[in-house]
Amino acid sequence: MTTLYAKKNGIRVAFCLLIFLPALWSAPQEYTEEDAPGPLSPAHAKSVGLKNCMKCHNEDFEVPHSRCLACHQEIAQRVAEERGYHRDKGEECSMCHTEHEGEDTVLVMLDPEDFDHEETGAVREGPHALVTDCRACHRKDNTVPRTGSISYLFTRTGCLACHTSPHPGRQDLCLKCHTQTSWRVDHWRRGGRL
């Protein structure tokens, strides 16, 4: 026969188990390299490290878009400004950029030889449309350094990235008079060259 004291203790134990066991399972875990489905790409292994899984992954082991953009701030800025290739990409980053596939992982899968600039909002017009060699615009000296390799994301688009200005003091105001298809040259009407 069970005493009243034993019944109360049994109820207390059952109550504690009901309350605390689910909390143990739902508590955030710290994942380790051994939990990973495969090795990181060299870029992420270097910047995030193999022991900082929670820097990218949430408690459900998903990689939220916001965590990618926290590190890739230049992309976040372009998304916010609705500029560039990622300007209208609503899906999660991992839909295109897969990780945990090792040293040979290709995180950027755009083919520079067959790339449609209209996808970036940077439509090439006039003489610029005739340029077929990507490296003519996307050069090491014309990109913002990030990884030490040529980046197609960071090409400076200002006129002075490629052209020299004949107008001292009017740097990068070119498009007020010049377009990619026509030139408005009224320098002489103002009494001489600017």
Image (cartoon, helix red, strand yellow):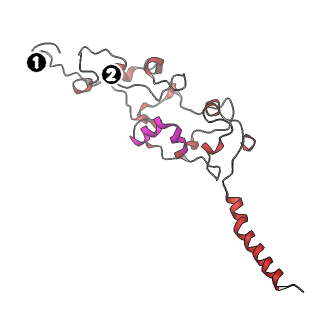
- Seen at 9% across and 15% down, the residue is 191
For marks 2 and 1, the one nearer the N-term is 2
Image label count: 2
Q: Amino acid at mark 2?
A: Cys
**Which corner quadrant of the image does residue 3 belong to?**
bottom right
Q: Are marks 2 and 1 in contact (CB under 8 Å)?
A: no
Disc 1 residue type (three-letter): Arg
Q: Position of residue 23 (x, y in %)?
A: 68, 62
User: Measured along the vertical axis of the image, is residue 49 above or below residue 155?
Assistant: below
Residue 159 is labelled as 2
Q: Secondary structure at mark 1?
A: helix
Badge 1: few (under 14), some or many (20 or more) residues near its Cα, within 10 Å?
few
Task: Give the camera-side residue of 98 and 12.
Answer: 12
Give the left or right position of residue 44, taking residue 84 as reference. right
Please state the extent of the stretch shown in magenta in the rendering. 67-82
Residue position for label 1 = 190
Q: Is residue 75 magenta?
A: yes
Q: Position of residue 1 (x, y in %)?
A: 90, 86
* Residue 92 in sight in this render: no
Above or below, comparing residue 112 to residue 94 in the picture? above
Q: Residues within 10 Å of mark 2 (few under 14, many from 20)?
A: some
Which residue lies at the image location 37% right of the left edge and 26% below the top edge? Answer: 157
> In the figure, is residue 105 to the left or right of 154?
right
Element class at badge 2: helix
Q: Is residue 78 magenta?
A: yes
Name the chief secondary structure element in magenta. Answer: helix
